Image (tube, helix red, strand yellow):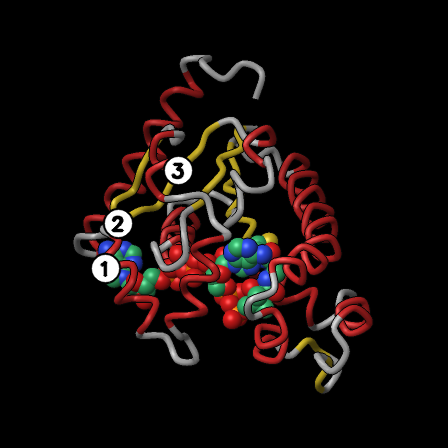
Amino acid sequence: MLRIGLTGSIGMGKSTMAKFFAEAGVPVNDSDAVVHDLYAGEAAPLVDAAFPGTLKNGAVDRQELGRQLAGSPDGFKRLEAIVHPLVRKREAEFIEREQQRSADMVLLDIPLLFETGAQSRVDVIVVVSCDPQIQRERVLARSGMTVEKFNMILARQTPDAEKRARADYVIDTGHSIETARKRVAEIVSDLRRRLASGEFLNA
Ligand SMILES: CC(C)(COP(=O)(O)OP(=O)(O)OC[C@H]1O[C@@H](n2cnc3c(N)ncnc32)[C@H](O)[C@@H]1O)[C@@H](O)C(=O)NCCC(=O)NCCS
Ligand SMILES: Nc1ncnc2c1ncn2[C@@H]1O[C@H](COP(=O)(O)OP(=O)(O)OP(=O)(O)O)[C@@H](O)[C@H]1O
C-alpha cells in the first residue's frame, strides 16, 4: 500500500487538496481533524493538566490554548510532547484499517511532516504551495488570526521553499480551485501508473 504524505505551510490549501484526494478515491487521514477529535476526548485532561484553564465543557478550548502559547516556544514543545504520540497512534490505526481493506494507496495529511521527521513514514511527498502574498491574505482573512500569531506559526514551520525542494510533487494553489483539482487528479493517476509498473515494490 502506497503511503502519500501531504504537507504544506499554514494557509497553502492543504485541507482543500486533501478533500480532492478523497474525491479521487484515496482514503485520507487528516492529522488536524485527529487533533480536534483528541481535544474533545482523551487528550483533554492531559492538556488541561499541562495548561490549566484550557478545559471548557469537557473539551480543549483552542482559543485559550492559543493564548497561553503566544510567544512560548517552550509551551509548544510541551504541548507537542502530549499530542504527537496520540496522533501517531491514530495514524497507525488508520493504516492498519486500510491495509485490511486492501487499499492500493492512502493519503496521510501531516502539517508538520518535515518538522517531525515523518518523511521516513511515507513513500511519496506532495507539497501544497502558493505565492507567499496569497498565503498571507488567506490566513489574515481568518477570524481570530493576527499578524503576531501568523508569524509565530510560520517561524515554527519549515520554510515553503525548502518544502518544495524536498517534494516529489508540488500543487500550486495560487490559481483557480479547478486547476488545483485537476493537478490532484493528475498526481493520483501518475501514482497509479507508477504503482502498476512496479516502481514501488516495497510500498
Ligand atoms: C496551537 C493550536 C491550539 C491553534 O489552534 P487553531 O484552531 O487556532 O489553529 P489550527 O490548529 O487550525 O492551526 C493553524 C495552523 O498552525 C499549524 N500548527 C498547528 N500546530 C502547530 C505546531 N505545533 N507547530 C507548527 N505549526 C502548527 C497548523 O498546521 C495550521 O497550519 C493548535 O494548532 C494546536 O493545538 N496545535 C498543537 C497540535 C499540533 O501540533 N498539531 C499539528 C499537526 S498534528
Ligand atoms: N486554488 C486554490 N486551492 C486551494 N485553496 C484555495 C484556492 N483558491 C482559494 N483557496 C482558499 O484558500 C483557503 C485554503 O484553506 P485550507 O484550509 O485548505 O488551507 P490549509 O493549508 O489546510 O490551512 P492550515 O494549514 O491553516 O490548516 C481556503 O479558504 C480555500 O477556499
Can the viewer see residue 176 in this picture? yes
How crowded pointer 1 is (Cα within 10 Å; few <14, some 14-19, many 20+) is rated as: some
Q: Nearer the viewer, residue 74 or 32?
A: 74
Q: Which residue is mark 2?
A: 130
Q: Which residue is mark 1?
A: 134
Residue under the image location 62 percent in, 80 percent down? 64
Residue type for callout 1: Ile
Which numbered disc covers residue 5? none
The quarter of the image holding the C terminus is top right
Residue type for callout 2: Cys
Residue under the image location 29 percent in, 42 percent down? 171
Please, is residue 51 above or below residue 10 in the view?
A: below
Which sits earlier in the primary sequence, circle 1 or circle 3? 1
- Asked whether disc 3 touches disc 2, contact meaning CB atoms under 8 Å apart, the reply is no
Relative to residue 92, is residue 178 drawn left or right?
left
Report whether the residue tagged 2 is closer than 8 Å to ligand 2.
yes
Residue 48 coordinates in the image, percent (x, y): 77, 74
